[in-house]
Amino acid sequence: FDGRQVKTFLLSEYPISVLCDRENHTWVTTKKQVLQFKHDHTGFLPVNINDTSQNTIGNIFQIAVGKVYLQSVNGFYIFDSAQNNFRPVDFGISNLKINTQLFTYYNHTIFFIAGESVYSFDPDNNKLKSLPVKSIFSMEAISDDKLLLSDWDYVTSEYNFKTSVISR
């Protein structure tokens, strides 16, 4: 993507996120679908998402390993280019309802909130770690093991997943 090409398109829904990945594919998410730009003639086309019953879609992003991920209320999905669809990522925990407003990533690690826990997920090693959390306003990853979280009282805490320590 050279930043000089502009294409006008209309969506029936409000866009949630936009990604231009390392392979120059342009993606747009709405609450109900993922669209990928094919070329100027056809524009954006929907991409199938496996297992999307009662689902709300959030952000689309690409981590350091180069894979494109999709975040939703029901979990995360990884793009399968051979099948041209998104398939669920298995965390080993079922029925997680993910907060689509609070998530971040750093290098190889995805951080997200579900219920009263903040999770760190390393898809390369399929490792999921969690620490307790309450009433979070914002979060920002500062390394593969550390996360800054701010609560609604403007108190910021560092969450260290390597040592399982929460400090202010």
Image (cartoon, rainbow, N blue to C red):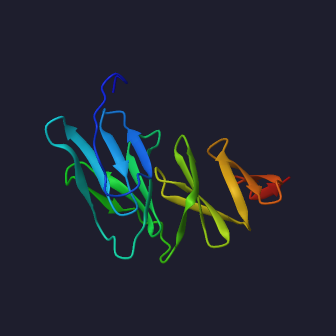
The reply to whether residue 23 is visible in this rendering is yes
Q: Residue at x 67, y 72 (%)?
A: 116
Q: Residue at x 31, y 32 (%)?
A: 24
The reply to whether residue 145 is visible in this rendering is no
**Total numbered badges shown on the rendered structure:** 0
Q: Residue at x 29, y 47 (%)?
A: 10
Instruction: Residue 144: give x, y in percent of width and height.
Output: 61, 45
Left or right of 75: which side holds 50? Answer: left
Q: Nearer the viewer, residue 18 or 23?
A: 18
Screen quadrant of the N terminus: top left
Left or right of 97: which side holds 27? Answer: left
Q: Nearer the viewer, residue 57 or 165?
A: 57
Instruction: Residue 66: give x, y in percent of width and height.
Output: 39, 39
Left or right of 158: which side holds 110? Answer: left
Q: Nearer the viewer, residue 88 or 3?
A: 3
Instruction: Residue 28: give x, y in percent of width and height.
Output: 36, 47
Q: In this rendering, is residue 125 above or below 32?
A: above
Instruction: Residue 127: give x, y in percent of width and height.
Output: 53, 58
